[in-house]
Every structure is written in C-alpha cells, then in structure tokens.
Image (tube, grey):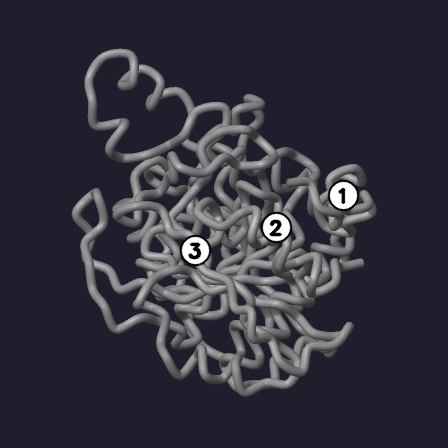
Amino acid sequence: MGYTLEQRIVLAQRALGNSVVAINHDVAGASTETIYVGIKDTECIPDDLIETIKSSSRYRILTIDKMSDFGRSVDSDLVNPLTFSPMTGSTSGGPINILKGITDVCIGTDGGGSVLAPALATNLYSFLGTGMGLTCTQKGISTDGIPLSPGVGVIGASLESVIDLVKLICQIDIDCSPRKRHLKLVLPAPSCKKHPSRATIYERIQSYLKALSVEGDWVTYPYIDMADRKSTVNDLKHIWREDPCAIVVSFEGPIDYPLPEESIRSSFRGLVEEESDVDHTKLLCNSINIAGGTAITIPADEIASGLLLAAAPGLEQVQNLVFLAKEIDKITPKSALFEKYFLNHEKALTIRTSTVF
C-alpha cells in the first residue's frame, strides 16, 4: 500500500538536500494507480528514455535522486536505512527514496555495479539493461583501469514493478510465460570464493535454489579470482562466448556491511589493507556492465544480500532471465518486518498540519 501523492511530496520535502535533489510539484493527472519514478541526478540517462516515461499515463516522474559525489561506489553523505552504514553508490538516493515511500521505482546508471550493488545493499530488486541496449553514450574508465560505458538500470520494491518499467523503456514485450524452457545455470565452483558465513558461494546459492523446479542443466565454473574485476569480466565473457544462452548465478553480499568496499579507501596502506583482504562481497555485480550483460538481482532474507542472475546480450536471453528470476523469487524468503515497514508501509505516516509557529 503506497502513500498518497500529498504524503509522498511531504516525505520528499523532508529528504530534500539529502536523498532528494529536486521535486516535481506539477504531477498532473495522477491517480491511485500512478507509479512514481525517481531519476538519478546525472546527464548520462538518455533524454529519449525519460521522454518515454513522461509520455506514459501510468508513470509520473516525482524526484531527481542524489548521486554520490564523483560517481563513487560509496556515498558518505547518505546512510543506508538498513545497515546504518554509508549508502552504496553511485545510484545512492533512489533506493533510499523507495524505502522511504517517496517513489516506487528509480532509474540509475551502472558503470561498475552502481545499480546492482545499491539495490542489493537495500534488499530491493534491480534490472541492468546493458545487454538490451540500455546504455549511455558517455565513456569512462573504472578505478581499476578498465574502459567502460555506463548501462542504465531500474531499481524497485518488487520484481514486477521493475520488469514493467523495463518493458516500457525498452518498448518490448518480454515473454516469460512458462513455456518449455531448458536453461543452463552457471554457478561458481565449490573451490571459489567463500561467503562471510564461511560457506562457499556455491553452497549459499544451493541453499536458496534447492526448491527450484526449472528444467535445465546446472554446471559450475572455476572463476580465477572473484575479488579481481578484470578477472571476473574476462570469465563472464568466456562463459557467454562458450554458450550465449548460459545464465550466470551468484550470491552477493552483505554489500558494504559491516565495512564499505570502496577503491579509494582500499588504496591506502595500513589497517585498511588488512580489512580489504577479509571479505569481498561484490563478486560479480561490479563486472556485469563491463562484460556487456543483462542482470537481475533478487533480495534475500539476509541483510544487504541477494541472488544475482546475469545473461549475455539478446532478447531470448533476457526472456529466459526474467522467467528464471520470477521462479526464484517465488521460493526466496524475505524479511516480513522489512516488508511491513519499508515496502508495504503499514506503519501509519503522520503529518502535522496545524500551525506551530
């Protein structure tokens, strides 16, 4: 149950100068069925994409959302409402505004994980559309020296809300009906990176997917070094060259908790060096865009964590990806208290209207 437009604007005003950069007060034609959108404060998002949203009777752009300074992967100006740690960036304001109930979905950009990681960090859903042609014209270089062009993605409180907006901005109908599909899932080999719980990533994935009833093949891949982005980008490209229909599966998180995982901070010597060697929990989410893939994240019942599914470019690939995501979402447990407070907004919002001063 979402808030009324009046309530959303009051909440946005409270967040102005924090997670909100600007508010659209001229939201004509809104109704109880309207879906409110936040747009990341960046020139990278294509104008035609924004015009497509504005031309839809179903959606209204309500806010411009804060972006972390210099596009950093951690926004020290904002606090993640779940972990109380600095908010993951650079699409930092949008997810917070969704949790506050200001907007329902947000549009962000992702050079090296800046849509997927913030969504995971706030236990929200996301879709990165690089493999669908949702990209920016600007080019850059990652902090570890990899050339890239940012992709565009959507973050939302439900998988359905995310996919519906993707279908609109891509102007396509994604067929994810339960027709006969034989999928190939690629999981990290048991010898790969361990989760902070000390279980392997393979074991973490298996614990969530053990009830999955989807026809297909499950194989493992021996990633060379899941803590090295250059290495994982090469691995992803190799997997999709060998089989363009393969869907890569990972378990990511807890993202930036209890300590942020950030390149500039990690470049210093001393205790930071020791901390940076402990746990890398952004395993593939910061590599998907650079590898040219399409990805979906599904939140788990673990804080700042979730499953990541990624596929090679192409419409058939994204259809299989969305189908698999929906099946996995059905069996993935969530935090009931989190949903009550942050997604269903069952806690009454009180707004003082009487004069105080």
C-alpha span from label 3 to label 1: 34 Å
What is the quadrant of the N terminus in the image? bottom right
Residue 98: image location, x then y, percent: 61, 53
Mark 1 lies on a secondary structure that is loop
Is 134 placed left or right of 219 in the picture? left
Residue carrying label 2: 124
> Of discs 1 and 2, which sits in the foreground?
2
Mark 3 lies on a secondary structure that is strand
Q: Residues within 10 Å of mark 2 (few under 14, many from 20)?
A: many
Pointer 3 with pointer 2, Cβ within 8 A = no
C-alpha span from label 3 to label 2: 21 Å
> Of discs 3 and 1, which sits in the foreground?
3
Residue 61: image location, x then y, percent: 54, 71
Residue carrying label 1: 333
Q: Residue furthest top?
A: 271
Name the amino acid type tagged 2.
Answer: Leu
Name the amino acid type tagged 3.
Answer: Val
Mark 2 lies on a secondary structure that is loop
Q: Which of the two labelled residues, at mark 1 and mark 2, occupies the earlier sequence position?
A: 2
Is 262 placed left or right of 16 in the picture? left
Q: Which of the two labelled residues, at mark 3 and mark 1, occupies the earlier sequence position?
A: 3
Pointer 3 with pointer 1, Cβ within 8 A = no
Query: Looking at the image, which is closer to me, 311 or 109?
Result: 109
Name the amino acid type tagged 1.
Answer: Pro
The residue depicted at 77 percent of the width and 56 percent of the height is 330
Compared to residue 13, the image places residue 181 above or below, namely: below
* Residue 206 is at least partly visible in this image: yes
The residue depicted at 39 percent of the width and 68 percent of the height is 130
> Of discs 3 and 2, which sits in the foreground?
3
* Residue 203 is at least partly visible in this image: no
Is 292 placed left or right of 193 in the picture? left
Residue carrying label 3: 21
